[in-house]
Image (spheres, rainbow, N blue to C red):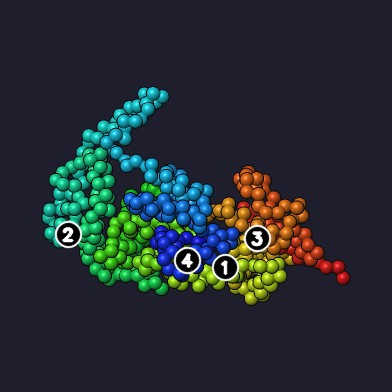
Amino acid sequence: MERIYFDKQIFSHLFKGDKPVYQKLYNDLLKNKDHFIFCYSHGHLLDLKNDKSKIKFRELDFIETIVDDNYLSYHATEKRTSCYLVKPREAFNDIEDDTEISFATMFDDLDLEFATPEQQEQIKLAKDLFENQKIDFEFSQIQDIPDEIKNPLNKILPVGLDPMTLLEWSEHFMGMLKSMEDDKSVYKGLRNVVDKHINNGKFTIDINEIDFNDDLKNSVLQKTFIEYVNGNLNPNGDKGITDYDFYTNAYFTLDLLGISKEPSKKVKFGSILNDSYHSYYGAFCDYVVSDDQGFLKKTKALYRLLGIETKVYHIDDFIPFFYLLSNSIESSPKMLFDLLINDIKNGLVVDNYQSIKFNRNTTVIKPFHSYFGFFNQIESFKENNQDFILLRRRTKNYSYFSFYRQYKGIINKAFKLFGSDLDNKGEFDWEKEIEEIKSGTWKGRFWDFDTFTILIEINIGIKEICLLLTPKTLAA
């Protein structure tokens, strides 16, 4: 069950269906929903939130026909990204209910009834610092710089440039973000200044190279690209940086520094931010698909720079690839075993090691085929003269979790190939088995045939769902 991520524009093409190629692709996607996980994210909802018409609700319902409830979102409090079982309409209603932050009233709703005197005093001091004590950000120095730099900066810096309280600066900052979203010239002017005086076209992206990272150290920044992004997020070096914060800032910085900038006629601050979210959430999937060349270029560059092996496709290239991918699904036990034998013989051997604790030698193979659309690594080993073949999944991207839908898809595919297991268990029982997985009591499936056994379970040692195939020794 490989994961596929379409950016918002692809969903719009499929929704409109004004081209036969998209009509056919949509039908092919529906036919293969049992074999792949199609994901949507918070980024899609932000894109649709900007649509003031009622069509967005029809589009949300349409997206659901493809993605079901496979929702990727970053939880700011927990500082982690997870997959939530939430349908697009429901998720969209949540963000529509979000109210804009008002820093001026942030202390008004605090209930201090149960606070200790010490806590009440701390809150009082914080309120006083936030609302009354002024801080000089030294913006007045802008008056001494050339007009070509000063004029664009005047559009985003506070009027008067006098010392400000944190409350005044926070309110200004929120207004600055809104002005950059509403007026293209604000962000465009800032980008032109930064690009000209730091990069000036010297450091750009070559899809096959990542030299811009180290080369940027030769600019006035005197830092690599990664160091520059980290420094902006954590100037004092005293806090951790999440993948979410680093990635979205890195994507935005590629455009701001002119390393991979959008054409001036089309660039929008809000669009760049939303594209950064799609690129980030795509790193939790196996495939990312778009028809936006700027998005594709930035995404490929950052994935390559960060060692993310998610494959990035233009829609024109993805359509024929998806046809091949969907036709490579195992249709019979014989096909599966033939593929497995070929991979054991001809797959790329990436490791070979002897266990210290057990009488076991393991050969690790990268196969040509992805089994059940999920298992992409073979570990062939012999222990006490018994052969074992373990299929597991290894990914090099941001994803550190399996979707529950993947468990369901793997079990249902196995049932289709092998029938009911030894305990007469068939298709995945969603309500029951999800609770067993959560509680750590899930037993998976076990088949016992004349020449081999097959076990699908969450392996105790590595805490991942695996398939273990054990050939039986035939009597002479």
Image depth: mark 4 or mark 3 in front:
4
Residue 319, horizontal then vertical, whole percent: 48, 70
Residue at image mark 4: 23
Amino acid at circle 3 = Lys
Amino acid at circle 1 = Ser
N-terminal of the pair, mark 2 or mark 4, is 4
Residue 322, horizontal then vertical, whole percent: 52, 69
Residue 90, horizontal then vertical, whole percent: 46, 46
- Nearer-the-camera pick, 14 or 125: 14
Q: Residue furthest bottom?
A: 346
Image depth: mark 1 or mark 2 in front:
1
Q: CA distance from mark 4 to mark 1?
A: 17 Å
Residue 129, disc: none
The reply to whether residue 219 is in sight is no
Name the image quarter holding the N terminus.
Answer: bottom right
What residue lies at 46% left-to-right and 72% top-to-bottom? 317
Amino acid at circle 2 = Ile
Q: CA distance from mark 2 to mark 4?
A: 49 Å
- Nearer-the-camera pick, 224 or 406: 406
N-terminal of the pair, mark 3 or mark 2, is 2
Q: Quadrant of residue 6?
A: bottom left
N-terminal of the pair, mark 3 or mark 1, is 1
Q: The residue tagged with tag 2: helix, strand or loop?
A: helix
Residue at image mark 2: 149
Residue 326, disc: 1
What residue lies at 65% left-to-right and 60% top-to-bottom? 413
N-terminal of the pair, mark 4 or mark 3, is 4
Q: The residue tagged with tag 1: helix, strand or loop?
A: helix
What residue lies at 12% left-to-right and 53% top-to-bottom? 143
